[in-house]
Amino acid sequence: MHVNIDRIFTTVARNLDLQDFGKYTQNWVEWSYEAEKLIGSRHTFLQEEATYTSTGNKATGTITFTDNPVSGDSITLNGVELFFKNSTDLGEAKSPNELRLGSTLAITLDNTNAQYGLIQSLTGLTDVTASTGTYINAAVFHYPESLNVVSYTVDATTLTITAKEIGLNGNNFTLESDNANAKVSSMSLTGGKGIYRNQQIVLPENNVKLLGVRVGTGATASQHTELRSTAATHRGRVGKDQNDSKQRAFRYYVNGNRLNIQHDNLDEITIVYLAYPLDMRGYPMIKEGHETAVAQYIMWQMKLIEFYNGKLPQYITKELEKRWYFLCGKARGDDSMPTSEELKQIGNMWNTLIPVKSSNGLINF
C-alpha cells in the first residue's frame, strides 16, 4: 500500500517548525523520489503491465445498477465519493457530492427536471441531450482534477465511463461502490493502450525498470512470444535479411525513453515494468512504512543547504545523515520480512526437508 506524499510534507513541516512550506514543495517532491529510489526494496515500486498498438485505445469501465439506490448509498469515482440522497434529506441533495434520488432508477441517473441526476452532476450540463445549460453545483466543477479526465454516458441502468485521451493513463481511474444495487465492471478503467508506431514505444513516465517485453494478446501472429534484449553493436542490422526488406528478430533495445522492436511484423506489444506510483497531481506516492525514512531524508537535504551556506555546524548534518541511513536500512529490512504465510511455508520446508505436496499432487513451495 502507498500513501499520499502530503503526509510526508506535514511531518517535515512539523519537525522543522515551518509554518508555510509551499515554496519548498517542488524540492520535497524530488527528494522524496530520491529517497524512495535509495530505499529500493522489493515493495517500493509496483509491477505494472502496459500494452501498445498502432492506434492505441481509450480505457473504459461501467457501473451497472440493478435497482434504484437508497438514501446514503454511494459510488466513488477516482477518489470522489458521491452520495445518493432524497430531496427531503438535510441539504436537499444539493451539495456537489450529492445526487438526487428520483422516483425511478432512470430518473436518478438522468434527472432532466431537477438537474441533480447522476449524469448532470458528472457533466455539469442541465440538458445533457442538447448539451446546454450549466449546473454550477455539479461535482465535475468542484473536483475537476479527478472527474474531468473522462467522459460519461448513461442509459436506463448503466453509467459508462471513457477516458478522454488514448493511452495508459486512463487505466488509473478508479471505481468503487458501497451500493448493493450498483456493480462496477472492475476496480479501475481497463483497456487503455498506448501507441506503437515505427517499431518504437515511448516508455511510461513512471517507469523505473523494464522487466520484460512480449508480443501482445491481440497480435495476429506470434502472440505471447517473449522478446529478448540485444547486445549487438550494429543494432539496426539485427534480424534483417540480406536485401534489408524484412526484419524478423524477436529482440529489442532501449535508447533513452524509447523501446525499439527489431521485428517489423508485430502489431501489438506488451511490456512489464517496475513503476513509481503517482497520485492525480503527478506527485510520487510513498510506500507505507517508509514515511519516517523519507521525511528524514528531506530534513537532511534541507539542512545541507544551510550547512553549505555556512549557517549550520557540520555535526548536525552528520547526525541527520546517520539517522537517515539507519531508517533507510530499517525500511528495507521491514519490507524484506516474510509474511506470516511465507513463514509457514518456510517452516514446512525446514521441518520436512522435502517438498510439501498438496491434496491434488502439486508441490507447494
Image (cartoon, rainbow, N blue to C red):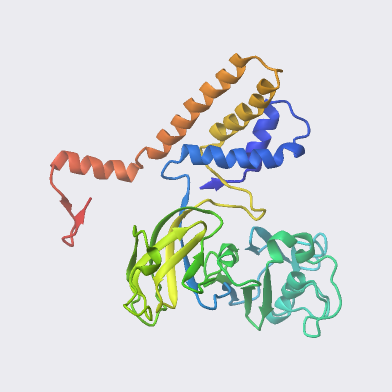
Q: Nearer the viewer, residue 30 or 22?
A: 30
State how many labels appear.
Answer: 0
Picture quadrant of residue 142: bottom right
- Residue 89 lies, in percent from the top left, at 79, 63
Q: Look at 55% across and 71% down and name the residue there.
A: 183
Q: Is 319 above or below relative to 121?
A: above
Q: Please, which residue is most extreme toward the front here?
A: 243
- Residue 137 lies, in percent from the top left, at 83, 65
Picture quadrant of residue 127: bottom right
Q: Is residue 59 visible?
A: yes
- Residue 1 lies, in percent from the top left, at 51, 48
Is residue 131 found left or right of 296 in the rendered image?
A: right
Is residue 358 found left or right of 60 in the rendered image?
A: left
Q: Is 130 above or below relative to 352?
A: below
Picture quadrant of residue 81: bottom right
Q: Look at 66% across and 42% down and name the residue there.
A: 6
Q: Nearer the viewer, residue 332 or 85?
A: 332
Q: Look at 38% across and 81% down and name the residue there.
A: 245
Q: Is residue 224 visible?
A: no
Q: Nearer the viewer, residue 70 or 345?
A: 345
Is residue 265 found left or right of 138 in the rendered image?
A: left
Q: Nearer the viewer, residue 76 or 28?
A: 28
- Residue 74 lies, in percent from the top left, at 65, 63
